[in-house]
Each structure stands twice: as C-alpha cells, then as structure tokens.
Amino acid sequence: MLLPSFSSGYRCAKLLRSLVLWCSLLSALPAAAAGLPNETERAELRTLLTAAIAEADSFEDRFDAEVWLLAMSTRLARFMPDAAERLELLRHIHREARRVDLKPDLVLALIQVESRFDRFAVSRAGAQGLMQVMPFWKQEIGRSNDNLTDVVTNLRYGCQILKYYLDREQGNWTRALARYNGSSGQTWYPERVFTAWDYWHTGDL
C-alpha cells in the first residue's frame, strides 16, 4: 500500500482510519428497469445512456474508497465467497454509482434485491444481469451488441437508468425505485430495497 505525503494532517487521519479498518478486518477473519411511460422521457434517457457509455470514472478519493471497499467486502461475503471477485465487483459498483452521483450502498441494495449478485440472472420479463436491465435499451441507444451480463456494462446502464428516475422524481427515492421496478404508485419494491440498504449501512441482518 502506497503511503501519501504526511504534510497534511487531514490525509494522515484518513490513512490512519484506513489502517485501523484493515487491521480490524484482518483480525476478524436482487425488477427490471422497465420502459418509460412516454416518448419524451424515453428520448431523454436514451441520450443520457448514450453519453454514459462513452465515459469512465474512478474513485475520487483513494483512501475513502479503500475504507468503503473493505467494509462492503465483509458484507458481500455472504453472497460472494471469493474475496478477489468481491473487491473487483465493489470497485466497479463504486465507480459507476459515483459517476452519476448515486450512493454506492444503495446500488448494492438494489442489486441484492434484483439479482442477489448473479451477473447471469434473467427475469421472466427478460431483464438481465446484476441490475436487471431490459435488453430493449441496447437498441434504444444504438448499441445492440452490448452484453448486459458483463458487469461493467450492466452497472453503467442500470445506474444511469436509476439516476434518471431519481432526477425525474426530484430526489424521492420511493417513487424513483418504484419506477425502476415498473411498479409506480406502489411501495412494496422500495421497501424491499430500503430493508436491504439498512444491511449495507450496518452489516446487521
């Protein structure tokens, strides 16, 4: 692990926090993104998805990301036993969520509800992958060859779609999640995601 400059007390404090978490962890050793209701919204989201595919981001802050990765890895272990696979997936989730200003732990909760972290999951409606994205979106943005079982591709689509709904609902998570699931006006799906979200916050079942 590369050490930062110690000229900043703030950076030192962050490094210390990261090291403490490392030590504590070492000693402790699953709805489809449904179609939009009208063509105007469909066109708006198509534009956003097209732009999203062409972009790529990484962690904004290395040490905060490290702390997050380590904490989430212990919680993801019940779904994915392989540590390297967990950290790789978490890195992608963190990047794609932050790229569109979503909370990474909320995306984790949604994935738990949608697919239980099965990248090959397919719903009865035909939604695919971790975030259960409907294949018609590939044609909508002119990328018919995209593979929705690919982790990064699926996360890029799913996070952009969820962010779009959140913006349309002016930050109301209950309505945004219901729209993502295709159950607008109902609360059962958001409640499931919120229950899962609490696990990613606290680590308690």
Image (cartoon, rainbow, N blue to C red):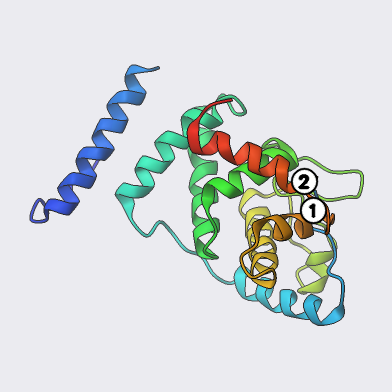
Q: Looking at the rendering, which quadrant does residue 130 occupy?
A: top right
Residue positioned 77% across, 55% down in the render: 178
Which residue lies most toward the right here? 124
Relative image position of residue 50 (x, y in whole percent): 67, 74
Q: Is residue 137 left or right of residue 16?
A: right
Residue positioned 69% across, 68% down in the render: 169
Tell me the kind of residue under disc 2: Tyr
Relative image position of residue 53 (x, y in whole percent): 62, 68
Residue positioned 65% across, 37% down in the render: 195
Relative image position of residue 133 (x, y in whole percent): 77, 55
Nearest-to-viewer mark from 2 and 1: 2
Whether pointer 2 and pointer 1 mark residues with C-beta atoms closer than 8 Å, the reply is yes
| First-in-chain label (2 vs 1) | 1
Residue underneath mark 1? 181
Tell me the kind of residue under disc 1: Asn
Residues packed near mark 1 inside 10 Å, few (<14), some (14 to 19) or many (20 plus): many
Is residue 119 in view from this perspective? Answer: no
Residues packed near mark 2 inside 10 Å, few (<14), some (14 to 19) or many (20 plus): many
> Is residue 177 placed above or below 120 in the rendered structure?
below
Q: Secondary structure at mark 2?
A: helix
Along the line of sight, the residue nearer the viewer: 64 or 176: 176
Residue positioned 54% across, 46% down in the render: 105
> Is residue 195 placed above or below 161 in the rendered structure?
above
Q: Looking at the rendering, which quadrant does residue 172 occupy?
A: bottom right
**Count of numbered tags:** 2
Which residue lies most toward the left here? 7
Q: Quadrant of the C terminus?
A: top right
Residue underneath mark 2? 189
Which label belongs to residue 114? none
Q: Is residue 11 left or right of residue 180?
A: left
> Is residue 9 placed above or below 113 in the rendered structure?
below
